[in-house]
């Protein structure tokens, strides 16, 4: 059996392609029940021009659930979010500022303590100690805050290594960090595939390690994605981190596409720092507050007796990693003393700046409570099967050579939920128009890629089955349309 054999590949097509098979897979998996925790828009809801759910069906399939495979962009709304947010609104309406401090029966934790309330669950999702994580700010802002602490260029070591196709915001963040330190753009090293065959953006671990080694002597920071947003490649975080450390390089991870998607062990893998958003697989809502991780070894706050130079008599000097600071990162007891003396909270919480949006924290809490109904390991098992099923169905094109290929690694260990499909040139617009019209939500990356992400918390085998039926028909029609457009063009040229 080949190393990455798809568990569904050996099934006879009559079984693999059948309605009954998809239904059976859903029935046999106890995690299928988690779908009911989410609001799945109907096809009519998506077509409706007014905001909110459709109240009157216009078309036959309006009441059918849409096929939402876009959790890699924006996760679906957990049902309980509405209730939690209502409780937040009621608290604010009835208690005003006391909502910050008072424990309320049936309420959410006082807003002042929401950051602590989210730690344990967040830590479980990313494989960290609760003190190593905090829910705060947004992803790009957090990358900057972390780099302000972890990227300390010297005359010898000043380069930042990023991945060539890293999300544009990461490029801008790294470029502007260089500018901030008066360093030239040439100090940004990008890892790109070694061969011209770069459409897939696939990077072998050996290649990543070799580029890092090549620049090691002059590199201060490596910043990589846990899962690549375009190709869906899941990098070997543990191995790359170990390699960087062996060369004396600090390494940070953008986990936008990894958190809530694949199990992570940030503490055990000795990751220096990481940041993520909570709106993709985490289902916290559009643009909601993000999160960050700072390894225990970097979050310590120690006291050193001063030798008498302290600003105050009997003062102690605190030793901690430098950072850009704000009052929310300071010890809770110090916050309202207004003494202008920053006393960092040990761990990731000490990186906080502002009091966080309680509305955002409430939405993230609702999402985390859904995750708490299972474990990341159990979700991963479901995800591996769902994505393998999607892969097997994509590879089983009814009607000759498929006009596309999957650019996400075939090795399940090198990918999460998402498969990125590279369509033959010129097909994307037709395909997207066709599938959207039929209630499929997937994400396009021009010029030719469609990203399809069955999120294990709420997507079903039945979703994948319905997607494939529509998608493959879309491809067939798109091929015919582009061929006839080409014929028309050549007839026109012949006529001229
Ligand atoms: C991989 C990755 N990094 C960074 C970002 C930017 O996130 P934010 O707008 O929350 O800063 C995104 C957004 O989708 C992303 O996918």
Image (cartoon, rainbow, N blue to C red):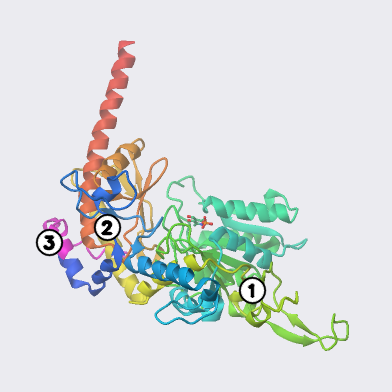
The residue at which mark 1 appears reads as 329
Q: CA distance from mark 2 to mark 3?
A: 16 Å
Whichever of labels 2 and 3 marks the residue nearer the N terminus, that label is 3
Q: Position of residue 438 (x, y in %)?
A: 24, 45
Q: Residue 369 in the image: state x and y as whole percent.
A: 38, 74
The verdict on residue 46 being magenta is no
Q: Toward the viewer: 239 or 271?
A: 271
* Distance Cα–Cα, label 3 vs label 1: 54 Å
Query: At which x and y percent is residue 62?
Result: 20, 48
Q: Which tag, 3 or 1, sits closer to the chain's start?
A: 3
The residue identified by callout 3 is 20
Is residue 5 on the magenta stretch?
yes
Residue at 34%, 57% in the rendered image: 453
**Residue at x 57% of width, y 55% of height:** 170
Q: Nearer the viewer, mark 3 or mark 1?
A: 1
Q: Which residue is mark 2?
A: 390
The residue segment tinted magenta is: 1-23
Q: Mark 1 or 2 closer to N-term?
A: 1
């Amino acid at each position: 059996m080949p190393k990455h054999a798809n568990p569904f590949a050996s099934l006879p097509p009559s079984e693999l392609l059948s309605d009954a098979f998809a239904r059976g897979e859903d029935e046999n998996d106890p995690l299928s029940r988690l779908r009911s925790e989410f609001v799945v828009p109907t096809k009519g809801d998506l077509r409706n021009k007014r905001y909110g759910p459709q109240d009157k069906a216009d078309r036959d399939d309006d009441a059918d659930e849409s096929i939402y495979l876009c959790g890699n962009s924006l996760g679906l709304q957990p049902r309980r979010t509405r209730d939690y947010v209502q409780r937040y609104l009621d608290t604010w309406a009835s208690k005003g500022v006391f909502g910050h401090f008072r424990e309320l029966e049936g309420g959410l934790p006082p807003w002042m303590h929401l950051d602590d309330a989210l730690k344990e669950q967040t830590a479980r999702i990313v494989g960290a100690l609760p003190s190593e994580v905090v829910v705060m700010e947004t992803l790009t802002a957090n990358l900057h805050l972390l780099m302000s602490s972890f990227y300390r260029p010297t005359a010898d070591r000043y380069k930042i290594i990023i991945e060539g196709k890293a999300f544009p915001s990461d490029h801008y963040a790294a470029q502007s960090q260089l500018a901030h330190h008066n360093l030239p753009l040439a100090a940004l090293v990008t890892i790109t595939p070694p061969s011209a065959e770069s459409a897939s953006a696939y990077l072998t671990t050996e290649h990543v390690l070799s580029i890092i080694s090549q620049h090691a002597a002059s590199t201060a920071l490596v910043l990589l994605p846990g899962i690549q947003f375009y190709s869906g490649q899941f990098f070997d975080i543990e191995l790359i981190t170990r390699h960087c450390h062996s060369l004396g390089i600090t390494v940070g991870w953008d986990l936008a596409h990894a958190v809530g998607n694949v199990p992570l062990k940030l503490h055990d893998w000795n990751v220096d720092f990481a940041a993520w958003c909570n709106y993709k697989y985490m289902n916290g809502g559009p643009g909601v507050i993000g999160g960050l991780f700072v390894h225990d070894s970097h979050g310590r706050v120690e006291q050193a007796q001063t030798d008498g130079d302290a600003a105050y008599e009997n003062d102690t000097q605190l030793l901690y990693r430098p950072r850009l600071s704000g009052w929310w990162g300071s010890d809770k007891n110090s916050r309202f003393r207004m003494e202008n003396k920053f006393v960092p909270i040990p761990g990731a919480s000490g990186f906080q700046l502002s009091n966080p949006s309680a509305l955002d924290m409430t939405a993230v809490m609702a999402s985390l409570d859904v995750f708490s109904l299972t474990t990341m390991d159990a979700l991963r098992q479901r995800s591996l099967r769902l994505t393998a099923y999607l892969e097997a169905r994509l590879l089983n094109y009814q009607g000759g050579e498929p006009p596309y290929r999957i650019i996400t690694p075939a090795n399940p260990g090198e990918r999460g939920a998402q498969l990125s499909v590279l369509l033959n040139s010129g097909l994307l617009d037709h395909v997207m128009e066709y599938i959207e019209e039929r209630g499929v939500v997937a994400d396009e990356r021009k010029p030719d890629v469609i990203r399809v992400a069955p999120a294990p918390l709420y997507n079903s085998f039945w979703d994948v089955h319905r997607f494939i039926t529509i998608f493959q028909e879309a491809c067939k029609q798109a091929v015919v349309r582009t061929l006839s457009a080409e014929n028309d063009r050549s007839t026109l040229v012949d006529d001229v």
